[in-house]
Amino acid sequence: KQEVTQIPAALSVPEGENLVLNCSFTDSAIYNLQWFRQDPGKGLTSLLLIQSSQREQTSGRLNASLDKSSGRSTLYIAASQPGDSATYLCAVKGYSSASKIIFGSGTRLSIRP
Amino acid sequence: ETGVTQTPRHLVMGMTNKKSLKCEQHLGHNAMYWYKQSAKKPLELMFVYSLEERVENNSVPSRFSPECPNSSHLFLHLHTLQPEDSALYLCASSQDLPRTGLHNEQFFGPGTRLTVL
């Protein structure tokens, strides 16, 4: 059974710092992994999608990497800004048609001005 | 309208009421999803529709009844809910590879905040 873990649950850093968010999964037979951000009380905004054949994806100041063998993905945020404050979630989809989409509990990020 | 829309944005209902949540996607996708997000719990997938057929039902109580009349619309009919059903209900859509259960990027709506009294 796939389990997705995001540690830490909360993170606070000063503005301008580069930071890394972590996502771990127990079953390496994944089809894709997607990173989202969620502002309080709002829906999820897709940030990056990494297919199982890819090692990383980049969008602006965001870079997501995928290491299936170790069951890890990281989301790197460069030059953090107060507007990056949100909860960041990762979700994993397995390769079999019966496998469910499993979300982590998220990391609540706060960027201090 | 673009993306995925949900109505209403907020809903307060009594335990004996019947209400419906509506989701509409304007992305041309062929799959739609209902998720439940409760405080301090990970997102829970409730239902998946692919090509208007329900392909996944994750042991959701029968007081939640989904309906997918076409690939752009998804409803969640609610009746005799319990206070513990209070949560944010999120709809999403994606482009699935037919009959494989595999999907590409998911796009979410803003959610309906449901409170059951």
Image: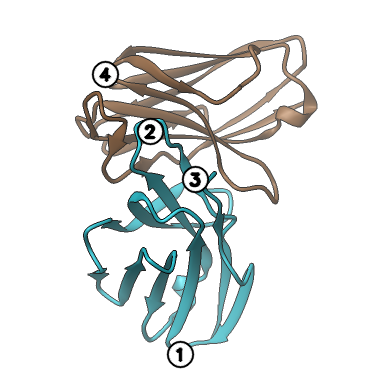
Can you see residue A65? yes
**Is residue A18 toward the left or the right of residue B115 in the image?**
left
Q: Which residue is drawn at 70% across and 32% down?
A: B86
How many circles with numbers are drawn on the protein?
4
Residue depicted at 38% across the width and 77% down the height: A76
- Categorize mark 2 by other alpha carbons within 10 Å: few (<14), some (14-19), many (20+): many
Q: What's the mark number on residue B5?
A: 2
In the image, the chain rendered in brown is: B
Q: Marks 3/2: CA distance?
A: 23 Å
Give the mark nearest the N terminus, 3 or 1.
1
* Placement of the C terminus of chain A among the 4 image quadrants: bottom right
Assign a secondary structure to mark 4. loop
For mark 3, name the chain.
Answer: A
Label 2, label 1: how far apart the Cα atoms are: 35 Å
Question: What's the residue type where badge 1 is placed?
Answer: Glu
Q: Mark 1 — residue? A: A17
Q: What colour scheme has been applied to the protein in the rendered image?
A: by chain
Residue B117 in view, yes or no: no
Residue A35 in the image: above or below residue A93:
below
Reading the image, the residue beneath label 3 is A102
Other residues around mark 4 within 10 Å, as few (<14) / some (14–19) / many (≥20) = some
Q: How far apart are marks 1 and 4 (CA)?
A: 45 Å
| Disc nearest the viewer among 3 and 2 | 3
Q: Where is residue A40 in the image (x, y as percent from the top left)?
A: 58, 55
Marks 4/2: CA distance? 19 Å
Give the label, 2 or 1, closer to the camera. Answer: 1
As measured in the structure, the alpha-carbon distance from the residue carrying label 4 to the one carrying label 3 is 22 Å
